[in-house]
Image: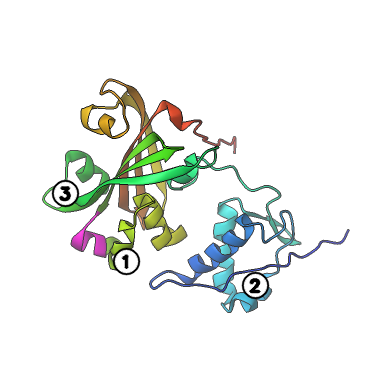
Amino acid sequence: MTTTVSALRLDPLSVPTGQPLRVAVYTSLADAIRGGRVELGSLLPNEAELGVALRVSRTVVREALMLLEEDGLIRTRRGIGRFVAEALPQVGLEQLRPLEKVIAEGSGTVTVERMLEELQPTSDFITRGLQVDPRTQVWVQENVVKRDGEAVAQLLEIIPSGEVLAERSPVLAARLEETRAEGRSLLAAVMDIIGPALGPAVYDVTVGRAGAERGKGIGLKASTPVLVLTHNVLLDGKPIYLAKNLITHGFGTLTIAQSST
């Protein structure tokens, strides 16, 4: 049986300042796969050919391919090569993604509205979650995610500020202004700036009440039950992002994939 090598149509490689080259290559290939510019199930060109196409070394290509395989976008058949997955993996909370993109998997038009953005002193929740000194300040955003105009989630999102942020992510500190663009969550901005190097991350899922202040932002009574998702994201082993997200009944289904292996 003859195996057809995929004809890749890649965008020019873009490497933001401070971003590892392997991350830029990963992003280029992942975008091509998810964007339908590579046939599902097809054989990828070998490392040397990809290196020539992208003008990077085989080592960089190999590292990027390992990231793609970890995300389930490609698979390796020993002795043959690497193949694009036959079906793109279903993603929900099991993959690090902005919450608005998880919501957008369903029907309807999803929008993100900025409610608050400011420097704030830490709280016990923030001090523990971001592992920062209680005397420091942090950047806080509150965003409401709506589907067809109805609020389905409220996001309280936090990153370090000042010297702590510069130490943990010089790239994010240098491009902090980009996180202030409206129309997307803080996590979406952070992921765009840092890329696949971000992670791992952990969601803690509990049931709570909307509360008087935050419930008002999504049109709920203080006593209304909500799902509370506490999200902690690491970068090189240190917390870089913390969130407490309130999810209403209109959110829909949250997918968490499981495997026996």
Q: Which residues are magenta?
A: 160-166
**Residue 131 visible in image:** no
User: What residue is drawn where x is 50% and y is 72%?
Assistant: 14
- Using the image, tell me which numbered label, if any, was put on residue 175: 1
Q: Which quadrant of the rendered structure holds the C terminus?
A: top right
The mark closer to the camera, 2 or 3, is 3
Name the amino acid, label 1: Arg
Q: Position of residue 62 (x, y in %)?
A: 59, 67
Of mark 3 and mark 1, the one earlier in the sequence is 3
Q: Is residue 61 magenta?
A: no
Spatial separation of the CA atoms under disc 3 and disc 1: 20 Å
Farthest residue to the top: give it: 223
Spatial separation of the CA atoms under disc 2 and disc 3: 46 Å
Q: Which residue is mark 2?
A: 50
> What is the crowding at mark 3: few (fewer than 14 residues within 10 Å), some, or many (at least 20)?
some
Q: Is residue 26 left or right of residue 181?
A: right
Which element carries disc 1, helix, strand or loop? loop
> What is the crowding at mark 1: few (fewer than 14 residues within 10 Å), some, or many (at least 20)?
some
Residue 81 falls in image quadrant:
bottom right
Frontmost residue, 10 versus 258:
10
> What is the crowding at mark 2: few (fewer than 14 residues within 10 Å), some, or many (at least 20)?
some
Q: Position of residue 177 (x, y in %)?
A: 29, 63
Q: Is residue 203 left or right of residue 107?
A: left
Of mark 2 and mark 3, the one earlier in the sequence is 2
Frontmost residue, 104 versus 93:
104
Q: Which residue is mark 3?
A: 120
